[in-house]
Amino acid sequence: MSINMNPAMNRRSLIAGVAGLGAAGILAGCSNGGSSDGGSAASSDGAAFKLGTIGPLTGDTATYGVSVTNGVEMGAEDFSTKDFPLTVKKEDSQGKPETAVNAYGTLRDWGMQALVGPTLTGTSVSVAEKCQSDRVFMIAPVATAADVTADKDCVFRGCFTDPNQGKNAAKWLAKNKPDAKIAIIYQSDDAYSQGICTAFTEEAKADKLNLVKPDLAFKTDTATDFKVQLGQAQDAGADLVFCPLYYTPASVILKQASDMGYKFTMMGCDGMDGLLSIKGFDTSLAEGVLMTTAFSADDPANAEFVKAYKDKYGDTPDQFAATAYDCVHAVAEACKKAGLSLDTAAEDACDQLVKAFTEITVDGLTGSLTWTSDGEVSKEAKVFEIQGGKYVAV
Amino acid sequence: MNAFIQFLFNGISLGSVYAIIALGYTMVYGIAKMLNFAHGDVIMVGAYISFCATSYLGMPGWASVVLSVIVCTVLGVVIEGLAYRPLRDAGPLAVLITAIGVSYFLQNAAQLIWGATPKNFTSLVTFPVPGFLAQYKVSAVSIVTVIACLIIMVGLMWFTANTKMGKAMRACSEDKAAAQLMGVNVNKTISMTFAIGSGLAAIAGVLLCSYSPVLKPTTGAMPGIKAFTAAVFGGIGSIPGAFVGGILLGIIEAMAKAYISSNLANSIVFAVLIVVLLIKPAGLLGKYVPEKV
């Protein structure tokens, strides 16, 4: 996940500009995030393999961080064995790279042996640099930008990259809806949205898809009003709008389109997951929305996980929680494969985990997962359609 | 042509949301001579109150708006009394920083109370749109927003021109010390200004979220900044100026998106602002007051 949205940040710089007061922002930004021990499944003598996880637990993007860290915590409980217990420590990044690096430092002091995190792309890129230079094994569950794993042998990833998501979506359309007249609405100041959009456009052109209005952009600070973009898409006769967006702007688009009486099929990627769980959202608006995502809470095969998660956190797990859970599963498998002992130092664990990771196959919630030596996961791309308020595989 | 008119209406409806918020900014600035950067966050609180009243307490839409206006009015008075009144004689920078602090406080308090997960605000305004407007895809909430905006603007102008409290407000805006000597209770007047401004913020919050349904602790931040821009654009301190500024800002934004580049929409809006301020430093309808030495 890459997130580049912080209206408070924009406002802060603007106010600083107006008043000529850079210091205001610095003062406001130094509140310290809480941290907590969680999911401890340590054996009776307290020894356990120490997993760290980092995510925004407060702030604008907290919903992603909470999902990921919950998923890691549950994974650590479920994949602890008597001989090889796992314990987890969560740290708050507030979605900021510099805070995430501090959080990483805290985890290192605690004695972390492998890192499942951070959550967002920006934070993951910074922490990945540290992990690479310190030789600490890291798997970023849901950070999608190519930079996270590029040139770093000890950094792995649990999800598709942005370009792959865009490509998968275009290929799926070429196969299943070759006649669609497609418009694209994307967020031009967000790496996630931009990355998918570029790859989608390339693949769509290669597949001769009919792109009638491919360049409808918006930015964080214009994300409240999409009527102009929708008007242009409608004018161009688009019947499918590809929206590589997070669910928040997507919900606004659906609402405003319905206000305008414009009917189309919306297609999105994994960031769209969560659309149905927005409190108060009229889910009938989302009927027929397509999305490429890795996990469906409605799939009977995942029922056990979903129930356990609901019981523990009172919320339906999304794909972020599921992917993080799978990553812990994979780390546990890799530890077993490499025959690590509980007191292996992080640096030694790293080399062995890197080797083991390319050899394991994990039958996880998000499919059957294997990893290549450049850290990328390979799994099946799934497309879901929202029907009757549920995700249905299509 | 059809598309052009549609974009124009989009601009007007977006602009009227900015205008309602801008009216609150301009009221407070005009009278208390301070930029209340927490105004956008009072909007957010207003929207949350209305959201909770309808979805948790099952109140009807109109009652939730009334409740939200009452809560925000009280909140405005409390903020003014606790945070701004002690700084009445301090420099403008101290007050500005305090306002930024209040803004962060409200955002973080909202996050503690309601959580960071965005909530979807169900529009409180739904009625069939008359045919000649429906063909341009004008939504019911846009019509209500424009009408509400006009009523509020006229109401405020009447209030400041004709009532005793309104005259006291104008007196405070001209010269606080002189007003006090003439028997105006300055603290009470400024409290009243905040009460009105915050009450308006509650209405703005409900309309903003009916228009763009995502409600989260930072919902008020960006529209607040845009509305502040609109207020400066129209001439800060001027009530009709806030209205004109808001509507123009909305139209420029919509047209820039439609015909120039959706990427550059905001850059164009702010470029226009700079040009206007170069030509008319006090804003479109602002009064230029020469410094007398």
Image (tube, coloured by chain):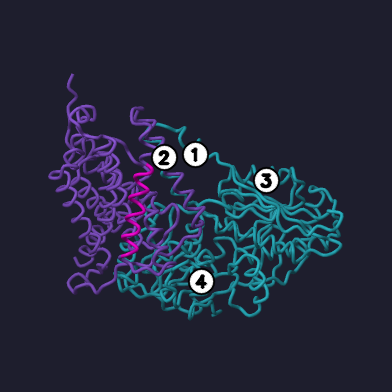
Chain colours: A cyan, B purple
Q: What amino acid type is highlighted by mark number 3? A: Tyr
Q: Are marks 2 and 4 on the same chain?
A: no
The mark nearer the N terminus, 3 or 1, is 1
> In terms of sequence position, does the residue under pointer 4 or pointer 3 come before the other?
3
* Magenta part of the chain: B63-79
Asked whether residue B66 is drawn in magenta, I would say yes
| Helix, strand or loop status at disc 3 | helix
Q: Which residue is mark 1?
A: A28
Residue A161: % across, % down: 59, 61
Q: Is residue A161 above or below residue B130?
A: above
Could you tell me how far apart the alpha carbons at marks 1 and 2 are, in whole angstroms? 9 Å
Principal SS element in the magenta part? Answer: helix
Residue position marked by numbered label 2 in the rendering: B100
* SS type, badge 4: strand
Q: Residue at x 19, y 51 (%)?
A: B153
Q: Circle 4 sits on which residue?
A: A291
Residue that mark 3 sits on: A104
CB of mark 1 within 8 Å of CB of mark 2?
yes
Q: Is residue A246 a member of the stretch shown in magenta? A: no
Q: Chain of mark 1?
A: A
> Within the image, what quadrant is residue A42 found in?
bottom right
Q: What is the three-letter code of the residue carrying label 2?
A: Ile
